[in-house]
Image (spheres, grey):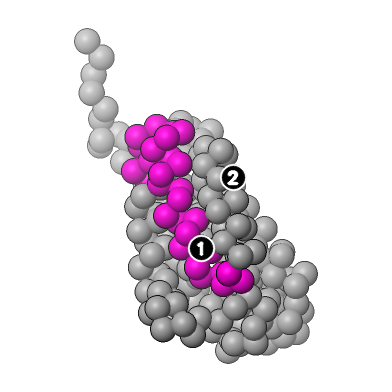
Amino acid sequence: MPDPISWSFAAPYFAAALVAGYLLGAIPFGLVLTRIAGLGDLRQIGSGNIGATNVLRAGRKDLAAATLALDAAKGTLAVWLGGLYGPDMAVIAGAGAFLGHLFPIWLGFKGGKGVATFFGILLGLAWPIGLGALAAWIATALVFRISSLAGLVAALAAPILAWAWATPQIAEFTLALSALIGLRHAANIRRLLRGIEPRIGAGH
């Protein structure tokens, strides 16, 4: 009979995957790109968020697109690197990247909302779910022109798609990330209910 998993043996490897994913996810691409471009501190612009939507408020569509792509890519890269050592390591590294984006040590643990990195992680773990969630974001954004609402709709859609198309482990993981996205959007949800949430391209 095979021996059960030895947690004392596996724990250091899981911890290494988590930390490596965290450090990758903690790279604040939006802040770095806007500083290189001479736009100052992104945290002093618009909503103060470090994600692509706030980069767009700085008036640079090209930098916003680059931020979106890089924030997603770090999630995909973390999953891919972890996956070289097995599916469990892929999930753990992806979790680390997501937490790194939300709570980067370099910025006093005050990071982004996690939607782009969420897409990247899903594309790395199970690309149909990632594409489905991205399609939900695009459709909502085109209709309502509100980035936060699009992100929340995508976060709601992803676990449903995961239960249909992926393993229970990935579905549960997706649900956990979606819940964190919801928590990070608490202020946005309040503004949505009041009808004052800024639209995509608005100056604030």
Q: Amino acid at mark 1?
A: Gly
- Callout count: 2
Q: Which residue is mark 1?
A: 151
Residue 40 lies in magenta, yes or no? no
Relative to 80, is 60 on the left or the right? Answer: right
Q: Secondary structure at mark 2?
A: helix
Q: Nearer the viewer, residue 21 or 190?
A: 190
Mark 2 and 1 residues: CB-CB less than 8 Å, in contact? no
Q: Amino acid at mark 2?
A: Leu
Q: Which mark is residue 131?
A: 2
Earlier-in-chain disc, 2 versus 1: 2
Give, as a single range, the part of the protein colored magenta: 144-173
Q: Secondary structure at mark 1?
A: helix
Res. 89 image quadrant? top left
* Quadrant assignment for the C terminus: bottom right
Classify mark 1: residues with Cα within 10 Å, few (<14), some (14-19) or many (20+).
many
Residue 74 percent location from the top left of the image: 59, 54
Residue 149 lies in magenta, yes or no? yes
